[in-house]
């Protein structure tokens, strides 16, 4: 991974929560504040296909991160992104709404007859309320709301290729089965 | 790194935003635990020592916090002590309960080399044998005895299995059937829903018994074998899901061939169990001397065979139809455990038109039997998908 100038021991990885992405990265980027560490590159509206992101976007595991701009038509060389039509609010741990998350799917070919792929993009943008609150708190001089809302930060991944972090901080299905077998043991023990 | 560097300086986390401690199993073993057993200083003091007998699982998270970001799992070193001076068992009891091992130990590999083992433990509240199972899970990693190259472990010899330093990860178990956490998963077949479909597609009782049997008799067996089996069977999984498979397979893919996650692996594990039982049953009826996997103990498999046959009796009609699948089909059976063994092309081997018709055992006659070129078995899953299309 391109850790930029992040100097951390082995095992530390870029695993931002949605809140991290909005609060620490998008917010600062939009407010033209320096991001430290400045790890997420700005790919603007370059028409990269999702499989081209490696080496251009910040890669961690099988997820890619980059800044972009809001746009209605996100076309690439060999396909296009289409919104799923669901927008979720991004909330802080204190349930404060800081942004919006939009899901897009990648279609291979030409719209509208493209073939749906497993590539997913999560596009984060600042919600209007958070933009205004930030202009209130951080920089009173900025009055152009459009500057805030044109930036997005994107997380791209392939849906069915499960995130293989190697750590497996979850039980595998097999472990789950063994776990339930332990119950059977206890039930059958008295006999 | 500076010596005074700590994960938290004046209450300020030294971990930049967006970064989390998310080590791979290899990093845990090869970097952290190796340093620990050879008394080397570890940067940032990321992994702390915990006396498992003194801390309850819910207290561990406070002690093992890294920075200020919310965590789902916690890491620590623990020194294993024997429960009794003469025995080999480890004492893992706390004031409120005890940790109990479950399943079988998993071998951890690094670049194809065995580097350690992982034990899975569950926390029970209360006292054995009347403990109440909790959602707290621990993965306990130990270095492999032969690979630990320091003198320390050599002196201890075999005792290192149950004594010495281990590195652990605790986390709270989520439910097997995760709630759909994104709107996308509702419209798509995710690993989780695939699993549940598979679990419901055949008798759960049968699966439990089979897995229990396997768990009891093949406990120390290495899970990587199963992973290979799963990869081998992947075409069955994907064949019915997407009619565009053929075209997508040609797309450039960033996915590495080794990227199957533990979750999908175990899904495939469930599949191969299912397939094994069918095959065992079918061929058991037609072939008096089935060929068992080369490295397995025949008695275990014979017992499994009997068990499965008793579960699936009443299907002997269809089994007889399968007489056309004679010996070469069993060669398929021997493959998965020894993927490096070179076998000749098996022209008369079969592939399965789709999982559905296979599970149902309906209309499974010779006209449905496709050729399956086994020479492709060592290629990537994507290629196998491609090859398994009926257009060969």
Image (cartoon, coloured by chain):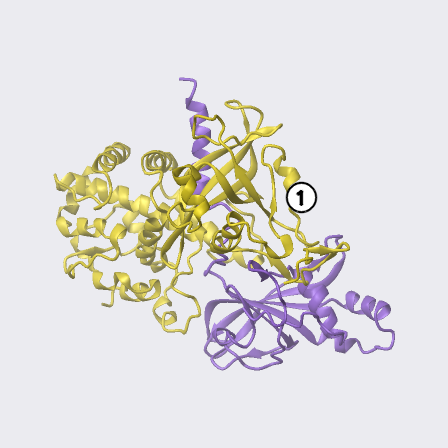
| Label 1 neighbour load within 10 Å: few <14, some 14-19, many 20+ | some
Q: What element carries label 1?
A: helix
Residue B183: tell me if it is visible.
Answer: yes
Chain letter, yellow in picture? B
Instruction: Residue B244: give x, y in percent of width and height.
Output: 38, 68
Quarter of the image with the C terminus of chain B in it: bottom left
What count of labels does the image hold? 1
- Left or right of A153 on screen, residue B384: left
Judging from the image, what is the letter of the chain drawn in purple? A
- Please state which of residues A10 and A178 is positioned toward the viewer in this rendering: A10
- Does A76 sit left or right of B201 as displayed? right
Q: In this view, does B249 lie to the left or right of A176?
A: left
- Frontmost residue, A26 versus B340: B340
Residue B41: x and y in percent read 59, 54
Q: Position of residue B71 (x, y in %)?
A: 64, 50
Q: Mark 1 points at which residue?
A: B63
């Amino acid at each position: 991974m391109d850790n930029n100038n992040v100097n951390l021991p082995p095992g530390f990885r870029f695993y931002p929560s949605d809140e991290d992405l909005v609060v620490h990265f998008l917010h600062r980027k939009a407010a033209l504040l320096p991001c430290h560490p400045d790890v997420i590159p700005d790919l603007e509206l370059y028409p990269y296909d999702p499989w081209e992101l490696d080496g251009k976007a910040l890669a961690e595991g099988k997820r890619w991160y980059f800044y972009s701009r809001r746009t209605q038509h996100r076309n690439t060389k060999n396909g296009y992104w289409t919104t799923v039509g669901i927008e979720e609010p991004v909330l802080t741990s204190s349930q404060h709404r800081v942004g919006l998350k939009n899901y897009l799917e990648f279609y291979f070919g030409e719209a509208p007859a493209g073939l749906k792929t497993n590539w997913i993009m999560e596009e984060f943008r600042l919600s209007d309320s958070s933009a205004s609150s930030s202009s209130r708190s951080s920089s009173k001089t900025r009055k152009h709301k459009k500057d805030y809302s044109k930036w997005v930060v994107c997380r791209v991944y392939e849906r069915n290729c499960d995130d293989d972090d190697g750590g497996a901080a979850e039980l595998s299905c097999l472990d789950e089965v063994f776990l339930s077998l332990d119950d059977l043991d206890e039930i059958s023990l008295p006999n | 790194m500076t010596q005074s560097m700590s994960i938290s300086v004046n209450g300020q986390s030294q971990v930049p935003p967006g970064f989390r401690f998310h080590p791979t199993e290899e990093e845990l073993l090869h970097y952290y635990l190796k340093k620990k057993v050879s008394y080397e200083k570890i940067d940032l003091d990321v992994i702390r020592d915990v006396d498992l007998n003194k801390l309850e699982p819910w207290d561990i998270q406070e002690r093992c916090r890294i920075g200020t970001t919310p965590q789902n799992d916690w890491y620590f070193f623990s020194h294993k002590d024997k429960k009794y001076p003469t025995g080999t068992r480890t004492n893992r009891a706390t004031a409120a309960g005890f940790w109990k091992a479950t399943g079988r130990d998993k071998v951890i590999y690094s670049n194809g080399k065995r580097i350690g083992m992982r034990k899975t433990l569950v926390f029970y509240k209360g006292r054995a044998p009347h403990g109440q199972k909790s959602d707290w899970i621990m993965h306990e990693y130990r270095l492999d005895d032969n690979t630990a190259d320091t003198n320390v472990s050599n002196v201890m010899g075999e005792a290192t299995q149950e004594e010495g330093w281990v590195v652990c990860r605790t986390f709270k178990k989520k439910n097997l059937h995760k709630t759909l956490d994104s709107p996308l998963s509702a419209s798509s077949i995710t690993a989780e829903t695939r699993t549940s479909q598979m679990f419901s597609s055949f008798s759960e009782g049968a699966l439990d018994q089979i897995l229990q049997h396997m768990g009891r008799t093949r406990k120390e067996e290495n899970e990587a074998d199963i992973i290979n089996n799963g990869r081998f069977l992947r075409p069955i999984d994907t064949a019915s899901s997407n009619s565009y498979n053929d075209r997508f397979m040609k797309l450039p893919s960033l996915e590495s061939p080794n990227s199957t996650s533990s979750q999908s692996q175990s899904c495939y594990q469930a599949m191969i169990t299912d397939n094994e039982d069918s095959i065992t049953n079918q061929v058991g009826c037609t072939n008096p001397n089935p060929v068992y996997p080369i490295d397995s103990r025949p008695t275990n498999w014979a017992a499994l065979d009997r068990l499965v046959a008793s579960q699936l009796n009443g299907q002997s009609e269809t089994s007889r139809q399968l007489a056309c699948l004679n010996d070469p089909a069993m060669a398929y059976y021997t493959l998965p455990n020894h993927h490096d063994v070179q076998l000749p092309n098996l022209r008369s081997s079969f592939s399965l038109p789709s999982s559905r018709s296979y599970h149902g055992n309906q209309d499974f006659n010779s006209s449905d039997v496709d050729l399956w070129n086994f020479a492709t078995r060592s290629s990537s899953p994507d290629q196998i998908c491609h090859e398994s299309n009926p257009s060969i």
